[in-house]
């Protein structure tokens, strides 16, 4: 499989037709734009009455009424209790209908796989998790087939009819990481020849979307997290490998080849001072796992969803020192190129560990000369180990129900 086959098109969508819930296959472009604008504004604000939507968009009350009524008929919006206490008739806020659309998200990791089904508000309705020693395409496809059936059976017939797609969040070019992945050569060779998206399309009754796993996690933060509504941010995800994503002007920016925010290859000085090495060889979870094995500790807790990482002891502290120093260097380099408003840090670890990383990175940044740079906000991501699977599920929702540029966070 070539790199081009791995990468998404500009919209991150498959070549298949959208379902009937798609908001554009048979509608005029302007109406589609306005509908997605309304949905995006309501998502941002939680709920809005028609008068506020008209004010924010500049569209006439009649146009907004037509759009809102249509989206309500389609099951994407629902009316809430009237707001009283104002002059005139009580206003009726509209909110996204949770069952208006659902999507599946598949995270293919280096040490585990997750399949979720998520609603329009980002609530995970069902989840399956399975750790493994290494990713095997045949086993992953078998897990997916069984998982789709199991999670679909948890939905009502009406909910199943509202599923708009399945998004895959997976590392690119797994075959290039023999030592880090730890899979037999024949398994790595299988990854080089298989078209995983095409294989999933044979199992899925819905359109299939594909993105790099860290980019997909960034999509989840953009659509469902980001409580301060930052328009430009660098997203850093510390998983088996360190990775990231970029948001510019309120839109996910995958880059020309889908690798925007690929933090892992950034060079750092080697410990011995002789040349440089990629930052992933210092900061990724596989490095911590190797150090634990060398010390006679079992690293399997790193891939489980629960676990008290503080029991790891001094090895964890040493790894955190190197990680936070390296992430601070990444932030300095990135903000010198793009004036990011914020840096969002998340990872495949417990939330208390994420908070420790965020605070220690802030402390490391105080050691740098930042003259000439505007300090970005350093904030914690919202979804931790679930970010990549949720990001996969976000891909169909972004493609079907949001706008491409800027308008996701449009103000008056």
Image (spheres, rainbow, N blue to C red):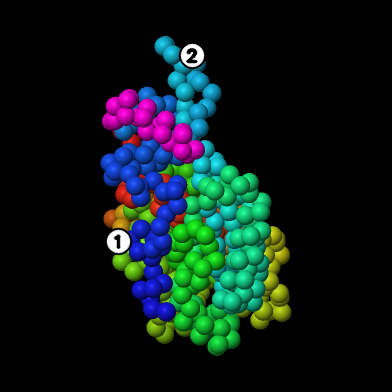
Q: Which segment did they paint magenta?
A: 58-76
Query: Does label 1 or label 2 sit earlier along the sequence?
Result: 2
Residue 318: image x %, image y %? Answer: 59, 70
Instruction: Left or right? Give the position of 223 relative to 403.
Output: right
Residue closest to the eye, 354 or 151? 151
The residue sitting at the top extreme is 87
- Does the stretch in magenta take in 207? no
Cα distance in 3D space between marks 1 and 2: 50 Å
The residue under label 2 is 85
Q: Main secondary structure of the magenta part?
A: helix
Instruction: Report the number of numbered marks.
Output: 2
Which quadrant holds the N terminus? Answer: bottom left
For image coordinates 56% across by 69% down, the residue present is 109
Give the secondary structure at mark 2: loop
Front tag of 1 and 2: 2
For image coordinates 31% across by 49% down, the residue present is 405
The residue sitting at the bottom extreme is 185
- Does the stretch in magenta take in 75? yes
Which quadrant holds the C terminus? Answer: top left
Residue 166: image x %, image y %? Answer: 51, 59
> What is the quadrant of residue 56 in the picture?
top left
Residue 323: image x %, image y %? Answer: 52, 67
Work out whether residue 166 can be spotted. Answer: yes
For image coordinates 62% across by 54% down, the residue present is 152
Residue 158 shows which numbered tag?
Answer: none
Label 1 close to label 2 by CB (< 8 Å): no
Up the image or down, 126 lies above or below 314; here it is above
The residue under label 1 is 337
Up the image or down, 69 lies above or below 346; here it is above
Work out whether residue 317 can be spotted. Answer: no
For image coordinates 43% across by 26% down, the residue present is 49
């Amino acid at each position: 499989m070539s790199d081009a086959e791995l990468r998404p098109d500009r919209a991150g969508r498959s070549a298949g037709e959208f379902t009937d819930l798609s908001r554009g296959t048979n509608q005029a472009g302007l109406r589609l734009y306005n509908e997605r604008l309304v949905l995006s504004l309501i998502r941002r604000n939680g709920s809005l009455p028609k008068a506020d939507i008209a004010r924010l968009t500049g569209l006439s009350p009649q146009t907004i009424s037509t759009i809102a009524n249509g989206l309500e008929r389609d099951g994407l919006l629902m009316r809430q209790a009237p707001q009283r206490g104002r002059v005139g008739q009580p206003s009726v806020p509209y909110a996204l209908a949770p069952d208006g659309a659902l999507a599946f998200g598949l995270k293919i990791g280096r040490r585990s796989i997750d399949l979720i089904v998520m609603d329009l508000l980002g609530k995970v309705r069902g989840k399956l998790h399975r750790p493994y020693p290494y990713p095997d395409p045949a086993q992953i496809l078998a897990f997916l087939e069984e998982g789709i059936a199991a999670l679909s059976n948890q939905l009502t017939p009406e909910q199943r009819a509202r599923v708009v797609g399945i998004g895959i969040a997976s590392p690119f070019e797994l075959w290039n990481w023999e030592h880090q992945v730890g899979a037999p050569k024949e398994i790595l060779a299988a990854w080089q020849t298989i078209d995983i998206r095409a294989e999933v399309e044979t199992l899925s009754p819905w359109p299939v979307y594909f993105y790099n796993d860290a980019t997909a996690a960034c999509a989840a933060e953009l659509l469902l997290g980001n409580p301060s509504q930052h328009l430009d941010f660098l997203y850093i995800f510390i998983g088996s490998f360190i990775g990231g994503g970029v948001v510019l002007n309120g839109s996910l920016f995958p880059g020309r080849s889908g690798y925007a925010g690929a933090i892992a290859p950034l060079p750092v000085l080697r410990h011995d001072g002789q040349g440089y090495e990629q930052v992933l060889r210092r900061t990724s979870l596989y490095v911590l796992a190797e150090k634990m094995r060398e010390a006679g500790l079992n690293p399997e807790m790193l891939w489980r969803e629960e676990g008290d990482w503080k029991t790891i002891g001094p090895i964890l502290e040493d790894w955190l020192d190197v990680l936070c120093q390296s992430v601070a260097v990444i932030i300095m380099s990135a903000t010198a190129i793009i004036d990011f408003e914020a840096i969002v840090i998340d990872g495949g670890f417990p939330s208390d560990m994420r908070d420790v990383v965020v605070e220690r990175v802030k402390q490391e940044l105080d050691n740098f000369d930042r003259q000439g740079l505007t300090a970005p906000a350093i904030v914690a991501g919202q979804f931790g180990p679930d970010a990549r699977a949720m990001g996969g599920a976000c891909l169909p929702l972004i493609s079907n129900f949001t706008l491409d540029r800027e308008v996701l966070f449009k103000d008056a």
